Amino acid sequence: MNDLTPAEVHALAVALGLAPTDDDLIEITHRLNAMRDALAPLAALPLDTVEPTPPSP
């Protein structure tokens, strides 16, 4: 998975109505890419063999 660039993160932020500063954009980009890396192993789970269940209250 390719890392998001600061320009891509800026475009996402603007789409959400946010206006991050340049310093914030660097930190946001780093954290967003770290989160994507941490969640990447979940894509390999064999979810097509699991029956859906309703959430418990």
Image: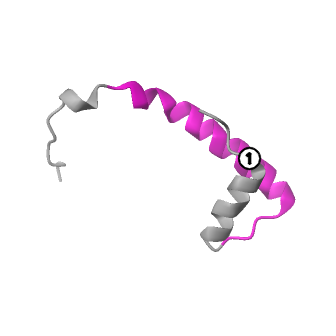
Relative horizontal placement of residue 11, taking residue 35 as reference (left or right): right
Q: State the image coordinates of residue 6 (x, y, percent, origin top left).
A: 76, 51
- Residue 11 falls in image quadrant: bottom right
Relative horizontal placement of residue 5, taking residue 56 as reference (left or right): right
Q: Residue at x 39, y 25 (%)?
A: 44
Point out the image quarter for the N terminus.
top right
Residue 56 position (above or below residue 51): below
Check the image and tell me how it is coloured: one colour
- Residue 47 falls in image quadrant: top left
Residue 9 lies in the magenta stretch: no
Q: Residue at x 82, y 64 (%)?
A: 21
Q: Residue at x 80, y 49 (%)?
A: 26
* Label 1: how many Cα within 10 Å (few below 14, some 14–19, many 20+): some
Relative horizontal placement of residue 37, taking residue 24 as reference (left or right): left
Residue 43 position (above or below residue 32): above
Q: State the image coordinates of residue 55 (x, y, percent, origin top left).
A: 19, 49
Q: State the image coordinates of residue 9 (x, y, percent, origin top left).
A: 69, 55
Residue type (three-letter) at the residue carrying disc 1: Thr
Could you say which is closer to the camera, residue 30 or residue 47?
47
Q: Residue furthest right?
A: 23
Secondary structure mainly formed by the magenta segment: helix
Label 1: element kind: loop
- Residue 8 falls in image quadrant: bottom right
Residue 15 position (above or below residue 1): below
For the magenta stretch, what is the residue range? 18-45
Q: How many marks?
A: 1
Where is mark 1, residue-wise? 5
Q: State the image coordinates of residue 24 (x, y, percent, origin top left).
A: 79, 57
